[in-house]
Amino acid sequence: MGERVTSGVLGITEDDRRDAGLIWEYHQMAHETRSCSTGIGLGSHDLGVAAFSAELYRQGRFPVLVFTGANSPTTAERFPRGEAVHFREHAIGLGVPDSSILVEPHATNTGENIALSRELLAERSIAVDSVLLICKPYMQRRAFATCRKMWPEVGIVCASEPLSLDDYTRAVGDERLVIDMLVGDFQRIVEYPKLGFAVEQDVPEDVARAYERLVNVGFDTRLLVS
């Protein structure tokens, strides 16, 4: 194996960036955004999810918007009152009426995001035949697979801020962290169906090889612990 010739930040090579780009594109579902019964904004560290949810609401894509999420170790300091609560406040500041927002403040993983949002909508007697899932750009495929498993009877449209990998990396400010997160989400797409958490999805060979290469050179901080 040849020497790793680095270019840029923290020993990240151009090969690493090409592999990350393949995984980034795989994570995108490329759904055409359409009107749905409800929008569900999945909580995370990324406040852009709340902003894009607000934009989609203003476009008339759904009449009611659910924000779902408690906290994870990575969001407790940023969103001390919980992800969903802070997302709601941000969306109201961007013009979404409070009356159009439901808050689900207990979910700690994607399966709970879907299951508890579904329960909340049912409690409010809101009929749902389609959902517009709004999430981080690299989480679309996993969110889709989880929702398809947990709520198979609804139509699912995935949406995220329309950002390139370079744009998203600049927004986060940590290229290595972003690649680690891409790798971690890819692993979950492969492993979660085996645990009953998500439906299986086809994985192109070039994307699988890109994942293996990135893990082998140390992009592994977001991998599941076996």
Image (cartoon, rainbow, N blue to C red):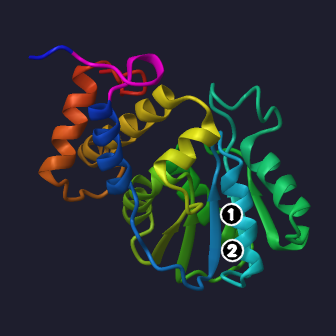
Residue 52 has which mark? Answer: 1
Q: Under tag 2, what secondary structure?
A: helix
Residue 10 colored in magenta in the image: yes
Q: Is residue 141 left or right of residue 205?
A: right
Looking at the picture, how far across and down is residue 118, in whole percent? 59, 65
Q: Is residue 32 left or right of residue 34?
A: left
- Give the residue at x 55% y 51%: 136
1, above or below 102, in the image: above
Q: Under tag 1, what secondary structure?
A: helix
96, above or below 146, in the image: below
Q: Quadrant of the C terminus?
A: top left
Looking at the picture, how far across and down is residue 173, in whole percent? 61, 32
Query: In the rendered structure, which amino acid carries the disc numbered 2?
Result: Leu
Q: Quadrant of residue 1?
A: top left
Callout 1 touching callout 2 (CB < 8 Å) = yes
The residue that mark 2 highlights is 56
Looking at the picture, how far across and down is residue 202, in whole percent? 19, 59
